[in-house]
Amino acid sequence: MEELEVALTKQKELSQELEKMATIDALTNIYNRRQIMKIAEQEFAKSIRYQHPFSILMMDIDKFKIINDTYGHQMGDRVIIEIVKAVLKNIRKVDILGRLGGDEFMLILPETNQAQAVGVAKRICSGIRELT
């Protein structure tokens, strides 16, 4: 009986790891492209159904290719990680950040109108400017 419990626990752990690999970007530990697009569709549908505001911010890192070409991909990865941290510090827990690929990101802002989204974008930009 104990062997069965161990096997089931191991199977559950493996299943959770596979789920994480399928939905989470390995570098940044935020949602990957497939998952953020799925969540965006769901949030958009909820917004339409309940007639609540909904915003999406699309972001990319300016001149990122120059960083990679000049300092290497390891430094580029560090830049991406630090920028993601800065974004996460400047959003609410209900906001959803995902990496579309490379230096492109999507931020889903449920219950957020256009004016509020502009405020979030400004706060994020300010937080990123403070990075050294």
Image (cartoon, grey):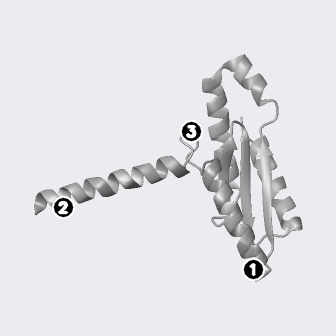
Q: Which mark is drawn over residue 5?
A: 2
Quick check: 82 above or below 113?
above
Gap between marks 1 and 3 measured at Cα: 35 Å
**For the residue marked with disc 2, what is the amino acid?**
Glu
Q: What is the count of numbered marks?
A: 3
Q: Which mark is drawn over residue 49?
A: 1
- Which callout, 2 or 3, points at the residue further toward the start of the chain? 2
- Which callout, 1 or 3, points at the residue further toward the start of the chain? 3
Residue depth check, mark 1 versus mark 3: number of the one nearer the observer: 1
Q: Which mark is drawn over residue 27?
A: 3
Front one among 111 and 102? 102
* Contact flag, marks 1 and 3 (Cβ < 8 Å): no
Q: Would residue 55 appear left or right of 83 to someone viewing this image?
A: right
Gap between marks 2 and 3 measured at Cα: 33 Å
Residue depth check, mark 2 versus mark 3: number of the one nearer the observer: 2
**For the residue marked with disc 1, what is the amino acid?**
Arg
